[in-house]
Amino acid sequence: MAELDRSFLALSHPVRRAIVERLEAGPASVARASGGLGVSKPAVTKHLKVLEDAGLVGRTVKGRTHVLRLEPQSLREVSEWLELRRFGAGAATSPRPA
């Protein structure tokens, strides 16, 4: 699966989008980034794996604390792709429906 596809797949779920939005303020522990979302710890683990596999979120382990951070390059690629299509610049290279 292409990196851009993985990014869009990762951002397709509201819990994962909420985690990304929380990390916009800066790095945070897993508990802080996922607290109050109404999902179990195993579900949070799965959501974070999708975000990490897509390259949208990175993790640093400090002792027993896992600190999450956004990976700006992956988000920039998504933003650039959307921006090109927003103004029709990508229309010539986009596949047309049959």
Image: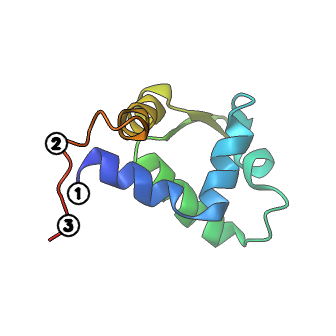
Q: Residue furthest right?
A: 36
Q: Amino acid at mark 2?
A: Thr
Q: Is residue 56 left or right of residue 61?
A: left
Residue at 41% from the left image edge and 49% from the top image edge:
7
Q: For this rendering, which residue is in front, 66 or 24?
A: 24
Question: Which colouring convention does the figure follow?
Answer: rainbow
Question: Foreground mark, 1 or 3?
Answer: 3
Location of the N terminus by quadrant is bottom left
Q: Amino acid at mark 3?
A: Pro
C-alpha separation, residue under disc 2 versus residue under disc 1: 19 Å
Q: Which residue is mark 3?
A: 97
Question: Foreground mark, 2 or 1?
Answer: 2
Residue at 77% from the left image edge and 51% from the top image edge:
31
Specify whether residue 68 is in view. yes
Q: Is residue 44 left or right of residue 2?
A: right
Using the image, tell me which numbered label, if any, was put on residue 93. 2
Q: Is residue 76 left or right of residue 46?
A: left
Q: Position of residue 50 (x, y in %)?
A: 46, 57
**Residues packed near mark 3 inside 10 Å, few (<14), some (14 to 19) or many (20 plus):** few
- Whichever of labels 2 and 1 marks the residue nearer the N terminus, that label is 1
Residue at 69% from the left image edge and 37% from the top image edge:
23
**In this view, 71 is above or below 66:** above
Q: Position of residue 54 (x, y in %)?
A: 40, 48
**In this view, 13 is above or below 19:** below
Q: Tell me the SS state at disc 1.
A: loop
Q: For this rendering, which residue is in front, 64 or 16?
A: 16
Q: Which residue is mark 1?
A: 1
Q: Tell me the SS state at disc 3.
A: loop
